Amino acid sequence: MKKKVLLGLLVCVVGLFSACSSDNNDDNKGGNTIVTGEKIIGFTDNHGTVISNIQYDKQGRLVSVTLETNSDEGKEKKHYYL
């Protein structure tokens, strides 16, 4: 009976350590991380402000944005470089 309990605990401990081991998936040693995933290409908020023409660099960082706002004087369009 003791051997079965100890064997069961050993299996559980080995399972936990193998599941929690850190994976080193850093294949990119040059530092040029390429971000994969979804990127925003445009957005309109509840006040009618339109964020468009969103551009990213090769590393997935935000580079520029065009912001169009509605005010009492009319529409105002600004382009921001980050």
Image (spheres, rainbow, N blue to C red):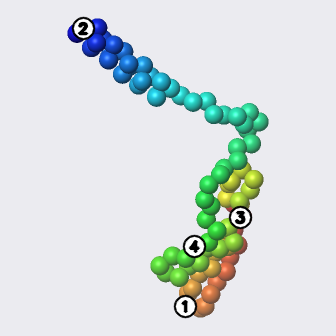
Q: Which quarter of the rendering shows the C terminus?
A: bottom right
Alpha-carbon span between mark 3 and mark 1: 29 Å
Residue tagged by mark 4?
A: 43
Label 4 secondary element: strand
Residue tagged by mark 2?
A: 2
Q: Which quarter of the rendering shows the N terminus?
A: top left
* Of the two numbered discs 3 and 1 in the rendering, the one whose residue sits closer to the viewer: 3
Crowding near the residue tagged with mark 4, few <14, some 14–19, many ≥20 C-alpha atoms within 10 Å: few
Residue tagged by mark 3?
A: 55
Crowding near the residue tagged with mark 1, few <14, some 14–19, many ≥20 C-alpha atoms within 10 Å: few
From the viewer's side, name the closer residue of 61 and 29: 29
First in residue order: circle 2 vs circle 4: 2
From the viewer's side, name the closer residue of 24 and 55: 24
Residue at left 67%, top 67%?
54
Question: Within the image, what quadrant is residue 32 found in?
Answer: top right
Please, what is the three-letter code of the amino acid marked with disc 4? Answer: Phe
